[in-house]
Amino acid sequence: MPLLPQVAMSFVRILYQFWLQQGIPQRVLDDVLGTDINDQKAAKFGISSDRLGLLHAAVNQATSDQVLSLRLGQYLGEKDLELESMICYSETLYQGLLAMSEHSRVISESGHFSLLLQDNGKYGLKFIVHDELTFSSQQKDMVFSTLLSWIEKVYIGCNEAIYYHFDENVASANEYQTLLNCHLLAGDEVFIEIDADLLMINNRNKNSTLLEKSIRKTKKILTKRQQRLDLYTAVTQCISESLLSGTAQQEVVAESLNISVRNLQRRLKEVGTSYQSILDDCREVLALKLIKNVELPLYEVSYLVGFTEPSAFYKAFRRWTGKRPGDYRQSVLTSNAELAASEASSVDVSPC
């Protein structure tokens, strides 16, 4: 069972503060997070990308500001995130975007950037989302407005060379125009296009020393993350293999890894997690899989996931998904029915 794509907790805290400043009720955020955002003992890396998606959805439900995510991106653009240094100090914007793309996992593992030459001669910069994730247009607005903020700081007057493709289902061109000073193109996908000339302009702020320092710092974080991933994967595999049989106790897992319980706890703490946290992640993944089987009663799903009391399972499930188990199952059934109907209607029934 792989580690769910994650988003850095330091980044989530910035989003959290912005949303509070914009009048989003703290209860709305905390109900989805299911953890104290200010608890320094919480996971050192972050929360799952799925949960961050739920946070964005909850915020969108709680606000009438259709371009709040654009404002969020511009807010992030002023927060001295490490990735900004790669654009700020690279020799060209092209090299800066490549460096930023290579190291973007330091903030989020939700996907990766793609910078490709297109048929129109411009370069398209897109965010390719992880296969198992849903990533809204509003989230992409956050991503690309952050990038635009960084680029505009370094390449003054670059707006005429940038084309912002926005999702017209989110907001109107007029609403986007109030915040973005570049070409706007309506569609159903969010990405930006950049003139080749802008990408190759020499950066007057280039500084190889500061660039290398930023890259070294980022690589150190990513190396620590990989160590966490390796240990997480080993523990997760043991838990997932024993969860259904009811033998997912910490002592059993430690024995299967040939280490003591104390050593296991210490190593997990060193990489910013805990046995209980991983167990919770495993339960979440298993629950989301089992609940799709409508023949399994919810109380049985609760038992198989490792809860002795259904009420505890219902509380945990709501923390994971923002929904009650029954409501989540119904939404899955409805989605499957709509998909089946759509596939049936798309069958070619033209006469021979």
Image: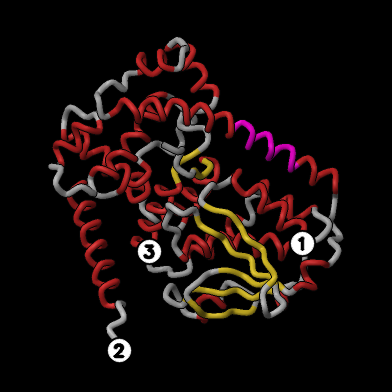
Q: Position of residue 187 (x, y in %)?
A: 50, 78
User: Which numbered disc, 1 or 2, marks the residue closer to the eye?
Assistant: 2
Q: Position of residue 5 (x, y in %)?
A: 48, 44
Which labelled disc corresponds to residue 93?
A: 1
Characterize the magenta stretch by its predominant secondary structure: helix
Quarter residue 87 falls in:
bottom right
Task: Name the residue beneath numbered marker 2.
Answer: 352
Amino acid on which the number 3 mark rests in the picture: Thr
Q: In what element is the residue under mark 3?
A: loop
Task: Name the residue beneath numbered marker 3.
Answer: 63
**Which of marks 2 and 1 precedes in the sequence?**
1
Amino acid on which the number 2 mark rests in the picture: Cys
Q: In what element is the residue under mark 2?
A: loop
Q: Position of residue 306 (x, y in %)?
A: 24, 29
Quarter of the picture containing the C terminus is bottom left
Residue 325 relative to residue 269: left or right: left
Q: In what element is the residue under mark 1?
A: helix
Which labelled disc corresponds to residue 115?
A: none
Q: Position of residue 90 (x, y in %)?
A: 80, 54
